Every structure is written in C-alpha cells, then in structure tokens.
Amino acid sequence: MLEQRGFPTDTRKLTKAHLHRIVHVNQNMMFYIALTSLPALGAGRPSKLVTLDESTTRQEDDNGILRLEDLNRVIWNNLERMQTVLYHAIEHAASSEPYNWSTGWTNAKITAMDHDERKRVFYLAARRAGEDNYAPLAAHRGLAAEALAFWREYWQRAVQGQGLQETDIHQSLEVLRSQAFAKLATDAPWCLSITSVPEDKVQHALDLALGNHAPLTIAQIAKALQTGRRAYDLIPNIMPVALLSVYLPIIDPANSTTYLAEGKRAMAAFRLNRAWYWWVEHHQPVGEDALGFYAAIGAEFGKRSTDHNS
C-alpha cells in the first residue's frame, strides 16, 4: 500500500516531499473534524469533497538556514544536553561503591527523609566522589569547562544582549517582592498585564492609570514588570541553576567558586522569572521557594571547597 502511494518502505529514504504530503493529509483531516464540530444550521450535505489547497498546508522550507536569533536557542539546547550527560555521570557515581548515597541508611530512615534531604545526601555522595577524582566523574571535567563557556556565551548574547543587566534583575526582584507592590497588585491587578503594551508606552500607561503609588515610582513598577517578562523569556527553566550550582561543582570541585558565582547569577534571574510569573498568572506572590535547596547545597559545596583548600 505504501509503495502504491509513492512512499518508501525504508524510512531512510523519506524526503521533504513525503513530509509535505503527510502534513497535507493531516491538515485536511483536522479540517474535517472542525467542520463536523460546527452546528449544521440546516445546511445540506455538500455535493463534493471539500479539501484544503496544498499552498495552505505546505510547510515553509528555509533550507536549514539559521538566523542570528536562533543561536541563543541552540546554545540553550546544548546546555540542556550537557546537563543530561553530567547528571547521568553523577547518578552513576552516587550509586556506586564506595560512594553509594544510601549506604548506612535503613529503608525506614530513607523513607522518613523529606525530598530535599534525600537530594542533599545524594549530591553530597557524588561530591565526595568528585573530590576523590573518581574516574567516571573526572572524565567529564572537559565537558564541565565547555558548559561554563557556553553558559557565559548565552548570558552575554541572550541576557545582556537584550539589555538585561544584573543590577536590573536585583532591583526588579526587590520591587516584585515588596509589600508596596503586593498592595498595588491587589488593588489594581490589571496592571500585571501591562507587559502586553509596547515598552515605550508602558510607563505612560501606568502613569495615567495609577498616579502616585509611593514608595514605588511608576518608572520602578514599569521596569520591574518589563524586566521580569524578559527573565521569564530568557531563563525559561531551572536548568542553569542546577547545572552551575550543583552539577559542575560535583564534576570539577577545584573550580567550585567559579561555578557557584555563575550559579548565583542564574539563580537571581530565575527567581525574577518566578516572581513575575506568579504575579501575572496567579495574582499573588511566588509560592514555596524551590530555589532554596540549590542555594543551600551550593553554599555547602562552597564551604567544602574552602575547608578542603585550607
């Protein structure tokens, strides 16, 4: 049947032309489903088959060319792949003798631990393996250095390239966490959606609608909401926090100070991400701080490095 319809039985021989045909059929089927879900309104059955023109279903072919803005996504995706590889190495170390994280713990005690404490014991076991130059971890130190370089490239290109500076992040986070902002967001929750307004109009729109909201100025409110939205877009998940605050200091303990410093930078940006998201989506301050674990384990790794060096 496949061959009669011009498709290869070897998937390695599939081409973009085949893909376009598959998409065309799929889009037509979705079109039929949409039509059957509409009220009939007394309309009779059509006299002929209704199909979509192929020009409306054909996917755009850009010849695989990457644009400059695509590089940020490539770098981020590569960091996620690095994180996955390093986590598997860490998991192996923390499950192998003599570093097995569960050694000395009964099942009852492990079950009684809360989630963060189990993670702490797990990562500390892997950290000991890293400090002992455990070969399966040490083999990834070159990748750790690459990950740091890729992260710094992403920060420079994507974050700073969008005009987002560390001082902006910290100041905006302070505003979104303040009691004054909480009162404003409660009294005028509509202002949280102001990021849909063009950036050059935000401050003017807030000024007209809100007037004076001391001790916060309109400029502070506008900047906090705009900066929070950028943090939400540019640091979309917790990956760099875990990578820099936990994984890299385990793989390469000697350079923990460098990794942890970058981890604090990533953590501040992701905290802003969460603060903005919770206000805009839930109209309330951020819930339980999941980043507290990463801050604590990072501080513990930093102390271990200081004690080890002394």
Image: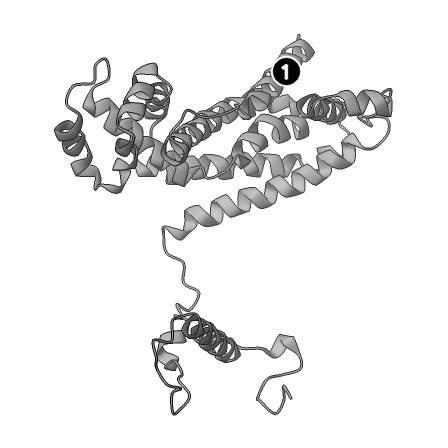
The image position of residue 22, as x and y in percent, is 52, 77
**Element at label 1:** helix
The image position of residue 227, as x and y in percent, is 32, 31
The image position of residue 71, as x and y in percent, is 42, 49
Q: Residue furthest front?
A: 42
Question: Is 288 placed above or below 85 here?
Answer: above
Q: Which residue is mark 1?
A: 300
- In this view of the protein, which residue sits in the foreground, 106 or 42? 42
**Dot 1, crowdedness within 10 Å: few (<14), some or many (≥20)?**
some
Q: Residue furthest top?
A: 310
Q: Report whether 117 appears left or right of 210.
A: right
Question: Is 178 placed above or below 23 here?
Answer: above
- In this view of the protein, which residue sits in the foreground, 211 or 125? 211
Quarter of the image for residue 12 reads: bottom right
- The C terminus lies in which quarter of the figure? top right
The image position of residue 145, as x and y in percent, is 58, 34
Q: What amino acid type is highlighted by mark number 1?
A: Glu
